[in-house]
Amino acid sequence: SFTPDIKQIQDDIAGPLGLKWENCSESERTRKLWSRLTNGEKILLVMDDVWDPDPPLDFDAIGIPKSDNHKGCRVLVTSRNKQVLNKMDCDKRIEVELLSEEDAWIMFKRCARISNSSSKKVIDKGRKIAKECKQLPVAIAVIARSLKGLQHREHELDVTLKSLKKPVSMHGVDDNVVQIYKCLMFSYDYMKDEKAKGLFLLCSVFREDEEISIEVLTRLCIGAGIFGEDYGSYDDGRNQVVVAKNELLDSCLLLEAGQSGVKMNVFVRDVAQWQDKGCVFL
């Protein structure tokens, strides 16, 4: 859902500030948070990855001070959508540029483990694949990691390049975002471990950026029958979860969270849910 969860946002801000609610009403929570953020202490509040919610994000309802009355509190908002920043009337906007073509190639080479000593064909095809990633770090990381160690199998590069060149359109979605989705879908389709695929889809049912423990995943995988009968004990099942998790981490389809948990990027989560519903790009 894209409807803002005001209480959850307030809780996320209050925790690091040591603010306790103590059975406050909704209006009291808002006043108490506003008072804490404007007590004169220098505070940087980061609102990361803000989408275009309906209804719009309301700073007054949350208890976040406006720019004309912040008293030491500064708010940094990041978003993929410029319209979000326009609606929020941000004082200053800083656009993060795409990687340069050369930096994109350097990143691709490092993630795919292509060296200057690789064959000219591999380097040429690698450059073309990197170009299809549109200088987007997420796309580069996912595609390059899926090709890691395949420098001597040129047909794999050909398949990848052909897949990324295939025209795709998604109504109302920015072209760069479409390209990220294409790269993520390719990485999922290319994965050969069915258990890793099952774990990938399972992780998508959790909330975006929610930290998921290995123990929770193990119990769910066993209960959902993702491993079939291919385990003899709980520890066997847990070991298989760890192996599948590591493959997804290596492919940049999961992110590490905490000491041993994982979480899923919002783009990756969308792709997993579309895949699970049998959706296709038209």
Image (cartoon, rainbow, N blue to C red):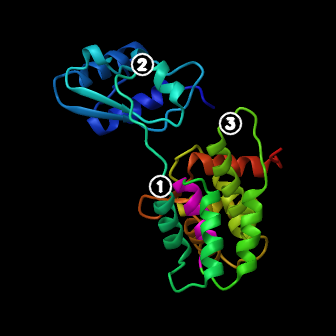
Q: Where is residue 175 in the image (x, y as percent from the top left)?
A: 66, 42
Compared with 72, 260 (above or below) is below
Read off the residue under disc 1: 100
Q: In this view, does 44 lie to the left or right of 182?
A: left
Find the distance from the CA under tag 2 to the CA under tag 3: 23 Å
Compared with 23, 282 (above or below) is below
In contact (CB < 8 Å): disc 2 and disc 3: no
* Amino acid type shown at disc 1: Ser
Determine which quarter of the picture holds residue 67: top left
Q: In the drawing, what numbered circle is on residue 173?
A: 3
Q: In this view, does 8 lie to the left or right of 52?
A: left
Label 2 CA crowd tier, 10 Å (few <14, some 14–19, many 20+): few
Q: Position of residue 281 (x, y in %)?
A: 80, 46
- Magenta residue span: 136-148
Find the distance from the CA under tag 1 to the CA under tag 3: 23 Å
Read off the residue under disc 2: 89
Q: Which residue is drawn at 47% across and 67% down?
A: 106
Q: Is mark 3 on a helix, strand or loop?
A: loop
Quadrant for the N terminus, please. top right
